[in-house]
Image (spheres, coloured by chain):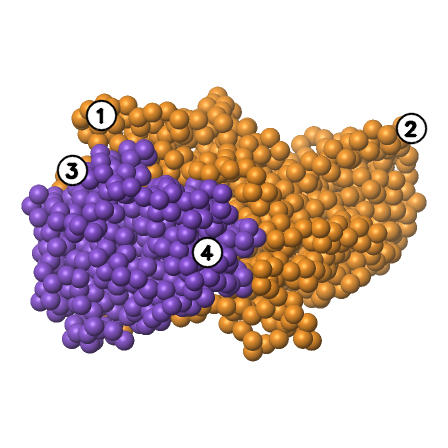
Amino acid sequence: MRTSKIAAGIAFAALLAVSSACGSDDSDDSSAAPSGRAALPSGTAADGSMNPVTVGFHNLEGGSISLADVRLGFEAGVKYVNEHLGGVNGHPLKAIACKTDGTPEASVNCANQFVEQKAVLAVQGADFGADAMLPVLKSAGLAELGSFPLTPGMDTAVGDAYFMQGSAEEGYAANLVQLKKLSASKVAVVMVDNPTSHETYDKVISPAAVKLGLETKVFYVPAQSDWTVQSATVLAWGPDAISTYVAADALAAVPAFRSAGFSGHITAGSNTEIIPQLDPSVLDKVLFSAPYYLPEFADIPAEVRGDIDAFAEYTSGLPKDGSVTQRQTGFYTALMAAQLLRDVGTKTDPLTAEVVHAGVKTWKGDRQPFRTNGWDCSKPSWPGTTACGTGNVYATPGADRTLAPLPDQPVDISAVLP
Amino acid sequence: MSEILLFLVLGLGVGAVYAALTLGVVLTYQGTGMINFAAAAMAAVPMYVYEELRHGRLTLPVPWLPSFDVGETPTWSAVAIAVAVAGLLGALTELAVSRPLRKAPPLAKVVAAVGILLTLQAVVGLKYGTVPLLRSVTLPQGVVELSGVNVAKDRLWLVGITLVLSVALAVWFKRSRMGLAIQASAENERAAGFARLSPNVTGLVTWTVSSMFTALILVLAGPATGTLSPSTMPLLVVPALAGALVARLSSLTVSLAGALTLGVVQSELQYLSQTKDWWPDWAKQGLTNVVPFVVIVVALFVLGRAIPTRGDDVRSSLPAVLIPRNRPRTVALWSAVGLAGLALTSGTYRFGVITSLAVSLIALSLVLLTGMLGQISLAQAAFAGVAGIVLSKLGDSVPFPLSLFIAATLAAVAGVFVGIPALRIRGAQLAVVTLAAALTLQDFVIANPKLVSATANLIPDPEIFGWDLSVRGGQSIARLPFGVLVLVIVVVAFVCVGNLMRAGTGRTMLAIRSNERAAAAIGINVPRVKLAAFAASSFLAGLGGGLIGYSRGQLSAESFGVFIGLSFLAVAYLQGITSVSGALLAGISASLGVVYVFMDRNLHLGSYYMLITGVSLILTVLFNPIGIAGKTRSDYEKARARFAPRRSPAKPAVRAVESGSGPAPVTTRRQIGDVTLSTRGITVRYGGVEAVSNIDIEVRAGEIVGLIGPNGAGKTSFVDALTGFARSSGQVELAGDRLDRRPAHDRARRGLVRTWQAGELFDDLTVADNVRVANETGNEALGMLRDIVRPSTPPAAAVERALALMSLTDVEERKPSELPLGRQKAVGMARALAIEPRVLLLDEPAAGLDSAESLAFGDQLRRIAGTGVGCLLIDHDMHLVMSVCDRVYVIEFGKQIAAGTPAAVRNDPRVLESYLGSQSFETAGVAADARAGREEVGS
């Protein structure tokens, strides 16, 4: 089961592993020192004499999939909050860092620790075993917060978990909307073979396709596939566009489709890390989506530039060979957690798990870090999910491999909402 | 049609990747007896080295060693370096792991392979990162047209290279002195010595060559392997093992064909299932992985044998079983310890105690199945998962504890299905088949979206008569009532299993574990016992899975996957798979158990946790192969023995005749009755060779009949045929009852009992239990239920008589291996007598005995025949045969050449010419001139 979990959860890479052209693992850490970066305005430090506000942070680290950079980014974010944003209404923000290995056992262990050590909020970096935490957190009245739900249980734990980006469902639907706008009519949907994919196709993609008048067919691929076989299978159906939900395997999938002669649009999720590894001719008509502005984007809005600068400043001391985007995800998550506690704490003091759990249900705001839009946790942005935010930006690499946003972004999904 | 052709060719590419691993696995198994579950993880290392070189870096798989910038490396240099690294890794594995474990039981080797897998997975993750990499293309690119189908050139190159290299490897394996030595060592290490090559050399060559062979093909395969990732790459070993199974882990050419076929079948299935509307939705999940395995398992089942035949390895080589005594005081003490463990802890530690208790049930299921019965199962986690699914499906519709009972029962049903192949496959092959079964349960059941929801598989909290037994409530993450509930279930289960182990069921299981053939020969229905054990063990695993489910509050399917099953087996083995205390220790050290919680809270191992786990596993297998519980008990026994009075050595059985200068006259009066055993036209063929040809014999009640002939005459084959251990034609009648279509155990139960030339005693049982187990056959499944409740029953009178008759009462509590050969033979006789046979077939009982022992044996034989048992004696000791037998049959090249009284036979010219030559025999005149019919003989 670990295998399917890995395959399933590898969707995380779609959202986390972005680097290189968008900041690769081996890049010069452009986010850490972007040219022309403005100095950070002076901020307020937390009051060290006040009791800290404790959150539990769980993240994959040390197992067969390790995302240590998410934790490093989160810790940098906590430091930024405490040194520059005044902590949580003056209280220092403190995190219980709990490393998971993707198994339910490790995640349950983290949840137990958070409850035992009186954390007021559970914060997820990236954790495939997180679903197993839900009964523990729910019983203790502890809410879960994160950037994106990697697992189906977290995606649908309405009232118990809250994720600040758009839901996975929105991503799937937006994908079809975008392809429809590009004149696709027969879309092959390629997914990792696991229960989540089957359920997602049946409940989200297929109904959305019907609403859009698209013909779709799903192809489930096992982990560790020979993509020559898989691409031949898909192309035997004769699609004019292909949506891939195979996470990092997009690296092999995209060239395989091109080698087999497919010249239509291919969507590759957020796997922009594949861009520098592929020939520009292969990347033609390959679409990528991004949850928020990345340091490498040109024309970053001014309000977002400040976030990018803070991120760069506070991650500048980290090793150069890490994943910038994983760090950005961690940093973003820390900022959102602090914002939640700050907002709820202004109404009720002291902060307890119950208070936070009750407060997050009506929590909303105007602008998230690294984004221009806001969030509203009082109503899921996609029905039945834990998403508080919305909006996906689609872009395609040019001849120089630079991502250029497509027209009319973010994608309007109102036509396919259930 | 063109698409079918396209996928056939593409499937060959996939098959080539499998072939690289399959041939490596088979070669390694032949040379070292180790099934290399880590083959794909090992191959990943040179693949990473190659990819790094293509990017101008030399990065060796040593965690603290930095990368070296080497600039642009020519492709073939990079290939050569990567293959060299593979060779080094293979050699290191041989020297550090495989060689020290050469004589270890198969189970230890399985565990070591799991340790290697975990270690390398961790090393690769630490060294090369966990983000998947795109494989570089090494072979020529482009497409060629074949019968109107465009096929990728690199796949054709890959298939061609694989075929050439595989054939070369097969020829080397078949023709070279080293290859022949490796094959010989697979059968018998001493035989390999005839090629003047030590096992150390063959082992080193095997590991090195197989690693380099696999690495070379996989490095060249490029994208055909899929992306390179430490989390998914090791899984490639699963289809490779399927190919290896097809080849029965022996033939390289069959392995090649099997792997290529598997690739093609997967490819075609992938195409058909994904593109054809008529393909049912429910059969799409995990299809390509599961179907080939199911076919292979079925094929192996059909081709396999219910009981091993001559030449099959029947040794279990497992550590000695520690039989629990289940004294009420001890049970109460341990229950109190458990209760204290729950009451004195709280929070995560109490949760750890609860998890340890629940997991100990899964480990206990392995103690029963693997420790007691010798059946290696990697599917226990899957059985636990089945129970978890059932609980989540039942929801609130069935109240606790009925819901838990139903869940465990359905897990037992799954266990019986998985156990069916175990009836015909054994040893390391069974480990692979259960791995396949676990994969099938994982993909087709536990992860099937038609059965399991991706989001909600809640398990309701247990409750009895309104009493809330839920694991958690509010801020309490581990409530005491739930802990007590788990403790009660665990104590009851441990007591029940302890009862089974010390009762007849336990003796029967140990008999099978020791020697399946001998077990069948004393009337044990081996298949039924195996299935019953699979059911009982799966029930236990199901209980454990159910309790884990209750502790989580929902089904977490990932807790019951294939690799979790491997880790359960590994931990159970290390803690002591042959003792119930080992099961407890396994629970304590399980994931989320007490030790896990302690380490997590106090030792921050971080990224090195997995590496430390893998290395620890290997080190423990190497230095403490009997497990921690076994070692503790062993040390305790040693300490106790130091202070206990020394026992006298086993007294020889022949003391009564030692002082005599000649054979003592036997006063036993025998009465020869009607024909009890008669055979007509017994014929045995091995391939084109007719080993036994139309042999007819008769044996009367109380009669001693000899069957003699030169070596290779077919005597043992004839006995094998009569007792159901060799396929034969012809009629076998025992007291008018046709036996020739009955299984071996049934023939024994009806009174046709044999002994073995090689003794074939149950080394895991004492002398008394060796004899007793033969008298406890029949109704194995019901007997199991009876033994749970009433484990202590006195031995039957027939057992006491047999022990007394063979003068074994003074060594009842010894192990057979502690006795001299003559007394071991007597144990074999007593075991056969305890069945109360009508006819006893004695296969060279005097072989290895000195003349005094032989004479004493003759006396015992007359006494046995005096009880009315007909005896057929096969032996080369002509003094014995001619002195005790009433009649003698002589066979040569499978054909009967003479029959009659000893006097008539020894004067038969054909017998003299072919067998006896000019030998003369002192027969003491004890049995000469016996005639058929009712007649008293003796002197």
Closer to the camera in the image, B393 or B475: B475
Secondary structure beneath label 4: strand
Marked residue nearer the N-terminal end (1 or 2): 1
Q: In the rendered structure, are the residues bearing label 4 and label 3 in contact, judged by CB atoms less than 8 Å apart? A: no
Disc 3 to disc 2, C-alpha distance: 110 Å
Query: Which chain is the one coloured orange?
Result: B
**Residue denoted by label 2:** B659
As drawn, the label of residue B398 is none
Which shade of the palette goes to chain A? purple
The local crowd at label 4, few if under 14, some if 14 to 19, many if 20 or more residues have their Cα within 10 Å, is: many
Instruction: Please give the name of the residue rendered at 34% of the width and 51% of the height, measured from the top-left corner.
Output: A335
Disc 1 to disc 2, C-alpha distance: 79 Å
| Residue B887 as seen in the image, left or right of residue A94 | right
Instruction: Please give the name of the residue rendered at 35% of the width and 60% of the height, measured from the top-left corner.
Output: A163
Which residue type does callout 2 highlight? Ser
**Residue denoted by label 3:** A36
- Identify the subunit bearing mark 1: B
Residue A12: x and y in percent read 32, 53
**Residue denoted by label 4:** A121
Q: Nearer the viewer, mark 1 or mark 2?
A: 1
Instruction: Name the image quarter holding residue A181.
Output: bottom left
Q: Nearer the viewer, mark 3 or mark 2?
A: 3
Which residue type does callout 4 highlight? Leu
| Residue B681 as seen in the image, left or right of residue B268 | right
Disc 4 to disc 3, C-alpha distance: 37 Å
